[in-house]
Amino acid sequence: MKLDNVKPTKYDNLYTQEEAIKFLCDNIDLSKIKRVWECASGTNRISNYLYKLGIKVTSTDIESGMDFLDHDIEDYDITITNPPYSKKNQFLKRAFELGKPFAMLLPLTTLESAIRNELFRDKNIQVLIPNKRFDFTGKKNCWFATAWFCWKLNLPKQLNFRKVKVTKDKVTND
């Protein structure tokens, strides 16, 4: 499989909104998660949210000299990240190679392509799909849908459709 020929795009620096992180956390079992590796940390939004929940997080990214594609850390239970979308194939392949559970926020179109079909085919990938688009742009009209692509998180099905309920002060999930 050729995974290295995709050039970076302007969509590589779309920072994760709290609404998306809360959606994931409300839909997975956090009780077994003691330490998270956030391997494309950027502005540390995922890390900061998880810290507030009392979860230890190791935050790394290519800017800090710890490229997920070339490095590993020792002590973590799960990788939770919003990787650069131009490198989603490489991030998924690497996460599968490491063998630890993961959750990656990716465009819903990640389900498409022969390369990812091969990556997902026998892996029992699970997708946590919100009923709305998360706003990465601040313009409240993000043109693409995202979902959390999960592995080894014991979600009830492979495709998990969940409702994101937005209230005036916070986001809740039904």
Image (cartoon, grey):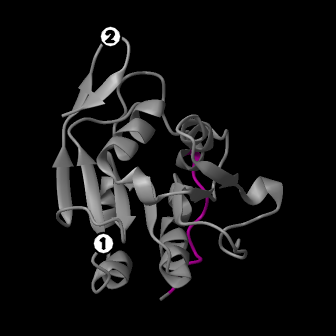
Query: What is the CA distance from the residue labelled 2 to the residue labelled 1?
Result: 34 Å
Look at mark 1 in the image and give the residue it sits on.
Answer: 125
Residue placed under numbered mark 2 in the picture: 168
Left or right side of 5 for 20: left
Q: Residue 121: which quarter of the image?
A: bottom left
Which comes sooner in the sequence, label 2 or label 1? 1
User: Which is nearer the eye, 63 or 127?
Assistant: 127
Q: Which residues are magenta?
A: 2-10
**x and y, in percent, of residue 28 in the image:** 33, 52
Residue drawn where x is 38% and y is 81% of the image: 119
Q: Is residue 116 above or below residue 167?
A: below
Q: Is residue 41 left or right of residue 6?
A: right
The reply to whether residue 126 is visible in this rendering is: yes
Q: Position of residue 8 (x, y in %)?
A: 61, 58
Examine the rendering and report whether any part of residue 112 can be seen. no
Give the SS element for disc 1. loop
Q: Residue furthest top?
A: 168
Task: Count up the numbered dots.
Answer: 2
